[in-house]
Amino acid sequence: MILSTINQGLLWAILGLGVYLTFRVLNFPDMTTEGSFPLGGAVAVTLITHGFSPILATIAAFGAGCLAGLVTGLLYTKGKIPTLLAGILVMTSCNSIMLMIMGRANMGLLNNKRLQDYFSFLPSDIAPIALGVLAVSIVIAAMMYFLNTNLGQAFVATGDNDDMARSFGINTDNMELLGLVISNGIIGLAGGLISQSDGYADVNKGVGVIVIGLASIIIGEVFFANVTFLERLIAIVIGSIFYQGLIMLIIRLGFNTNYLKLFSAIILAICLMIPTLKEKFFKGVKLNASNR
């Protein structure tokens, strides 16, 4: 159970990292997530079942997410459609696109090689974790590299204060467009990896995933405040593992799995309320090691 929780937490952490770019860095409430995530899975699974390499299929999942983010960005920056509505439009259209790609509502990977099979030289329960660690490390390293470039700093400045960013000559529309492309690319990558781990893709797999991504972020922020940017990204990974552990615990306690989305929303709501509850009832209590 523990190894399975860690494996799931690592893969879902990639979703959290993608959501972090829009919701926290860019301050953009992007609903495209619930379309780009299953789209990445649909693309990866379809390509693998048609004989393509799992590596190529995973890269294609990232590209599919990028395209979804690009459309949302163009609708918002060029079409002047409100942020939430632009994301909802793309999210809705992704459902039909996935049906076109797969030809049906779901598709399995039975007897097809998956990305974790490249780690078959490791014990069967360790191989998925090795893939998760590698994938998370690559995503975090790429995010750190990007955000430390001049372009990345302009992106951060746009999220901090777009009026000030424009006064420095930064094209904020382009920065928002770039952020949506990168964010949804990472989310599509997460969809491709998780669909391979689960062994199937489904058009309904994106329902509620934004809650999972936000839960990883919020849990990490609650328990690891006042940290560096790299530590914040690692905190998201830890938050994702902790969240998956809570879900596993709920399942082990015998609760109906049909209500997992409800439990996810409750966990997220509780995490969001913790700072307020701490301020109101537990003044002076330290919740994280950085404040000791």
Image (spheres, helix red, strand yellow):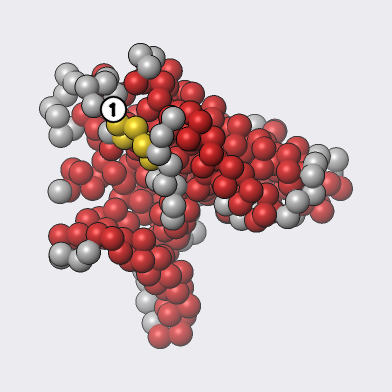
**Picture coordinates of residue 232 (x, y %)?**
47, 50
- Name the one closer to the observer, 38 or 143: 38
Quarter of the view holding residue 82: bottom right
The relative height of residue 131 versus residue 20 in the rendered view (above or below) is: above
Instruction: Identify the residue shown where x is 43% and y is 42%.
Output: 203
**Picture coordinates of residue 152 (x, y %)?**
65, 37
- Name the one closer to the observer, 85 or 242: 85
Give the side of residue 199 with respect to residue 265, left or right. Answer: left
Quarter occupied by the C terminus: bottom left
Quarter of the view holding residue 49: top left
Q: Is residue 59 visible?
A: yes
**Picture coordinates of residue 52 (x, y %)?**
39, 14
Disc 1 is placed on an element classified as: loop
- Name the one closer to the observer, 64 or 167: 64
The relative height of residue 200 versus residue 2 in the rendered view (above or below) is: above
- Name the one closer to the observer, 47 or 133: 47
Residue bearing mark 1: 109
Q: What crowding class fits label 1: few (fewer than 14 Cα within 10 Å), some (14-19), or many (20 or more)?
A: some
Instruction: Identify the residue shown where x is 49% and y is 59%.
Output: 226
**Picture coordinates of residue 242 (x, y %)?**
30, 55
Instruction: Identify the residue shown where x is 30% and y is 31%.
Output: 108
Q: How many marks?
A: 1
The relative height of residue 265 versus residue 111 in the rendered view (above or below) is: below
Quarter of the view holding residue 79: top right
Instruction: Identify the residue shown where x is 67% and y is 37%.
Output: 71
Q: Is residue 32 visible?
A: no
Residue, far bottom: 281
Residue, far front: 104
Q: Tell me the kind of residue under disc 1.
A: Leu
